[in-house]
Image (tube, helix red, strand yellow):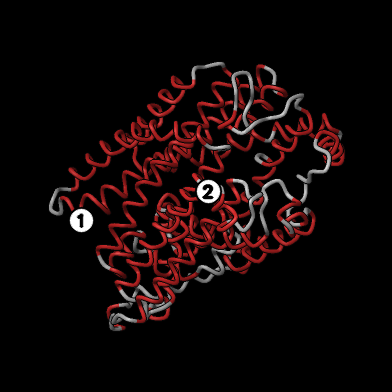
C-alpha cells in the first residue's frame, strides 16, 4: 500500500471510471471480462467464508459457543444490514468497526509486553521455549530456507507476496476498488491507500505481536489447524486465547467486540463486492441487459443473501489448512496474482491484444490451480515449484502466486506478438500513455499525496532497519 499512490498512478487515471471487469471488457473484450468477473465472484465468496470461520473461532474459544451456530448467527447479522443498506452501510460499518478493532485489539500487545517485561523479555522467553528457532527478525533469516520456520527464500516474499498478490489486491480486487471509485475526487482516491499504509504498517502490533506473545507465555504449544486433536489449540486460536488470558469481564467484552467487528467488516465487504460484481458485471451484461434499475437493486439484495449461504459452506474449507492465512494466500495466488499481470500489461503496454489478454489470464489462473493441486497431493512437487522440500504451505502459496503471474505475462506477450493490436484511437482512456491526465486542484504541499507517500516510504524503510 505504501507504493500505490506513487508507483501505481495508471490505476487512478484509468480505473476511476471503470470497475476491473468493466475495464477488461473494454480493453480485452467480453471473454476476459467474463473470466475476471467469475474469478472475482468466486474469490469474494471464498474470502467471506474465512471471516465467518474466524468469527466462529473467537466465539468458540472465548464464549464456548458451538462453531456451527456461531457461523450461522454471524452470517445472518451481516446479511441483514448489507442487504438493507448496500455499499453505503458496508463502508459506514467498516469505518465504525475499524476503531473498535484497534481499541480492543491493542489491549493484547500492551498487557502482554507488561507481563514479559518488554520486547527483550518476550524475545528471551521465545528463545527459551523454542531454542534454535528465529521468530523475531524479518529479513535476516530469509537468506536460506533452513534458517526460518517457513522454509522460504526472500525472493518469494518480495515478488511472490509483495509485488504480485499484495499490489494486485489493492488495485484489482473489487472489494477495495469499489471504495476508491466512491471517493469524491482524484486526490482523495490517491490519499486513501497512502493513509491506509500507515495503519497497515501498524497491523503487526495487533496481529504478529500477539502471536509472538503466545509463543512466549502460553504453557502449551499451538498446532496446525488440520492436525489439531480434541483438547488442542490451533494457530488460529491465538488471538482469542490471548484475549481470554489478559482481559477481565469488562475488557473481555471490548476485546470480543473488536475481533467480531473486524470479521464482520470483512464479511460485509466481500458480500457487498460479490453482489455488485454478480449484478453489474455478470447478470446485467450477459443475462438480462434491459431491466429496470429497481430490478437490479432487487437482484443485488437477493444475491447478497444467496452469497451468504454459499459462504457458510466455504467457511468449512478453512479447517483443512494449517492456518487461515495459508488459505487466504492460496486464494490470492488463484485469482489476484494472474489478474494483476493482465491489468498491468493492459494499462502500460498498448501493443497487448484482445486474445493475448484473455489467454494470458486464463493460463495464469489454470497454472496457479494446477501448481497448488500438484504440491497439495504430491510433496515431490514442492521441491520443484517452491525450490525446497522444507517450504511450508504459506511459502508454497507465495511461489504459486509468483509462477502464475510469470505464466500470465509470458503467455500474454507470446500471444500478443502473433496477433493484431487495436488502433490507438480505440485505446484512449484504457492505456496510460494514451489517457489524458486529470489535474488535481491546487493544494498546499502538506495536502499532496506525493508528500505523504514519501513519509510512508520513509517510515517503511526505518521499520525494515529496526526489525531486520
**How dense is the environment of label 2, judged by Cα within 10 Å: few (below 14), some, or many (20 and up)?**
many
Q: Where residue 163 sits: x, y (%)?
A: 56, 63
Q: Secondary structure at mark 1?
A: helix
Q: How many marks?
A: 2
Say if mark 1 contacts mark 2, CB within 8 Å.
no
Q: Is residue 37 left or right of residue 441?
A: left
Residue at image position (26%, 52%) is 280
Q: Where residue 6 sits: x, y (%)?
A: 56, 68
Of 196 and 225, which appears nearest the observer? Answer: 225
Q: Where residue 270 sits: x, y (%)?
A: 41, 43
Of 284 and 152, which appears nearest the observer? Answer: 152
**On residue 329, which mark appears?**
2
Q: Quadrant of the N terminus?
A: bottom right
Q: Quadrant of residue 60?
A: top right
**How dense is the environment of label 1, judged by Cα within 10 Å: few (below 14), some, or many (20 and up)?**
few
Q: Secondary structure at mark 2?
A: helix
Of 27 and 106, which appears nearest the observer? Answer: 27
Q: How far apart are the two marked residues, 1 and 2, measured between alpha carbons?
A: 31 Å
Q: Quadrant of residue 141?
A: bottom right
Residue on which disc 1 sits: 285
Residue at image position (35%, 78%) is 416
Residue at image position (52%, 17%) is 65
Q: Is residue 186 left or right of residue 351?
A: right
Q: Where residue 52 sits: x, y (%)?
A: 46, 32
Q: Quadrant of the C terminus?
A: bottom right
Nearest-to-viewer mark from 1 and 2 = 2
Judge whether 394 appears above or below 18 on screen: above
Q: Farthest left residue?
A: 290
Judge whether 361 appears above or below 467 on screen: below
Judge whether 410 appears above or below 16 on screen: below
Amino acid at each position: 500500500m505504501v507504493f500505490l499512490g506513487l508507483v501505481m498512478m495508471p490505476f487512478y487515471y484509468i480505473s476511476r471510471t471503470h470497475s476491473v471487469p468493466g475495464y477488461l471488457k473494454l480493453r480485452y473484450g467480453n471473454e476476459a471480462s467474463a473470466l475476471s468477473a467469475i474469478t472475482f465472484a468466486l474469490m469474494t465468496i471464498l474470502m467471506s467464508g474465512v471471516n465467518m470461520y474466524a468469527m466462529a473461532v473467537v466465539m468458540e474459544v472465548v464464549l464456548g459457543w458451538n462453531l456451527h451456530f456461531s457461523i450461522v448467527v454471524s452470517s445472518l447479522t451481516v446479511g441483514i444490514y448489507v442487504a438493507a443498506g448496500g455499499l453505503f452501510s458496508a463502508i459506514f460499518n467498516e469505518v465504525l468497526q475499524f476503531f473498535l478493532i484497534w481499541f480492543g485489539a491493542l489491549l493484547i500487545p500492551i498487557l502482554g509486553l507488561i507481563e514479559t517485561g518488554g520486547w527483550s523479555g518476550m524475545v528471551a522467553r521465545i528463545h527459551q521455549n523454542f531454542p534454535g528457532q528465529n521468530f523475531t527478525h524479518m529479513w535476516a533469516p530469509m537468506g536460506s530456507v533452513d534458517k526460518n520456520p517457513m522454509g522460504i527464500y526472500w525472493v518469494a516474499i518480495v515478488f511472490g507476496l509483495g509485488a504480485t498478490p499484495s499490489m494486485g489486491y489493492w488495485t484489482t480486487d473489487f472489494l477495495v476498488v469499489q471504495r476508491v471509485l466512491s471517493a469524491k475526487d482524484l486526490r482523495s482516491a490517491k490519499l486513501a491507500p497512502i493513509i491506509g499504509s500507515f495503519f497497515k504498517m501498524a497491523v503487526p502490533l495487533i496481529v504478529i505481536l500477539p502471536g509472538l506473545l503466545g509463543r512466549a507465555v502460553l504453557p502449551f504449544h499451538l498446532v496446525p489447524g488440520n492436525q489439531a486433536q480434541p483438547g488442542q489449540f490451533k494457530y488460529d486460536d491465538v488471538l482469542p486465547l490471548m484475549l481470554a488470558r489478559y482481559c477481565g469481564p469488562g475488557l473481555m467484552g471490548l476485546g470480543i467486540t473488536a475481533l467480531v467487528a473486524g470479521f464482520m467488516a470483512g464479511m460485509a465487504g466481500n458480500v457487498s463486492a460479490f453482489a455488485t460484481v454478480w449484478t453489474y458485471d455478470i447478470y446485467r451484461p450477459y443475462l438480462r441487459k434491459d431491466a429496470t434499475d429497481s430490478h437490479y437493486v432487487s437482484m443485488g439484495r437477493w444475491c447478497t443473501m444467496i452469497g451468504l449461504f454459499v459462504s457458510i459452506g466455504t467457511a468449512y474449507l478453512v479447517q483443512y489448512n494449517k492456518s487461515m492465512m495459508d488459505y487466504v494466500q492460496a486464494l490470492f495466488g488463484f485469482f489476484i496474482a494472474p489478474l494483476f499481470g493482465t491489468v498491468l500489461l493492459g494499462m502500460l503496454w498498448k501493443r497487448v491484444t484482445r486474445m493475448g489478454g484473455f489467454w494470458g489470464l486464463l493460463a495464469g489462473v489454470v497454472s496457479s490451480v494446477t501448481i497448488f493441486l500438484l504440491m497439495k497431493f504430491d510433496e515431490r512437487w514442492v521441491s520443484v515449484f517452491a525450490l525446497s522440500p522444507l517450504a511450508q504451505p504459506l511459502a508454497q502459496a507465495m511461489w504459486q502466486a509468483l509462477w502464475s503471474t510469470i505464466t500470465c505475462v509470458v503467455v500474454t506477450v507470446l500471444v500478443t506478438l502473433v496477433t493484431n493490436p487495436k488502433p490507438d484511437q480505440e485505446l484512449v482512456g484504457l492505456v496510460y500513455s494514451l489517457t489524458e491526465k486529470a489535474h488535481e486542484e491546487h493544494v498546499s504541499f502538506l495536502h499532496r499525496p506525493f508528500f505523504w507517500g514519501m513519509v510512508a516510504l520513509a517510515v517503511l524503510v526505518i521499520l525494515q532497519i529496526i526489525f531486520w
